[in-house]
Image: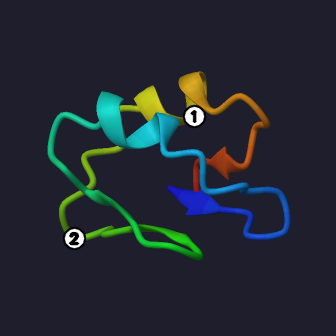
Amino acid sequence: MKINRNLCDVCGTCVAVCPVDAIIVDEFKVTIDNEKCINCGNCVIVCPIKAISEEK
């Protein structure tokens, strides 16, 4: 998964739906640990501003 940092407003909505705790939110940015990520797509679905997409 990939986060478009220009779009992301660090709302944290994606964190709650990640089944493997691969999304880390700090004060200024959201990061996805691609080692943990299982590409379920939950974060893509719930992101209200479509800042997360699947990496090809």
In the rendered image, the quadrant that contains the C terminus is: bottom right
Are dots 2 and 1 in contact, CB under 8 Å? no
The residue wearing badge 1 is 44
The residue wearing badge 2 is 35
Q: Secondary structure at mark 2?
A: loop
Q: Quick check: 40 left or right of 51?
A: left
Q: Residue at x 58, y 62 (%)?
A: 2
Q: Secondary structure at mark 1?
A: helix
Q: Residue at x 57, y 34 (%)?
A: 44
Q: Position of residue 11 (x, y in %)?
A: 59, 45
* Above or below, 12 relative to 23: above
* Above or below, 49 relative to 45: below
In the rendered view, how is the structure colored? rainbow
Residue 56 is at least partly visible in this image:
no
Q: Quick check: 54 left or right of 5?
A: left
Q: CA distance from mark 2 to mark 1?
A: 17 Å
Pointer 2 or 1: first along the chain: 2
* Above or below, 14 relative to 46: below
Q: Quick check: 6 left or right of 5?
A: right
**Amino acid identity at mark 1:** Val
Frontmost residue, 12 versus 49? 12
Q: Residue at x 63, y 61 (%)?
A: 3
**Amino acid identity at mark 2:** Glu
Identify the image quadrant of residue 41: top left
Residue 33 is at least partly visible in this image:
yes
Identify the image quadrant of residue 15: top left
Q: Position of residue 6 (x, y in %)?
A: 84, 68
Q: Residue at x 57, y 23 (%)?
A: 45
Q: Position of residue 50 (x, y in %)?
A: 75, 38
Q: Position of residue 42 (x, y in %)?
A: 42, 27
The disc label shown at residue 15, or none? none
Q: Quick check: 43 left or right of 33?
A: right
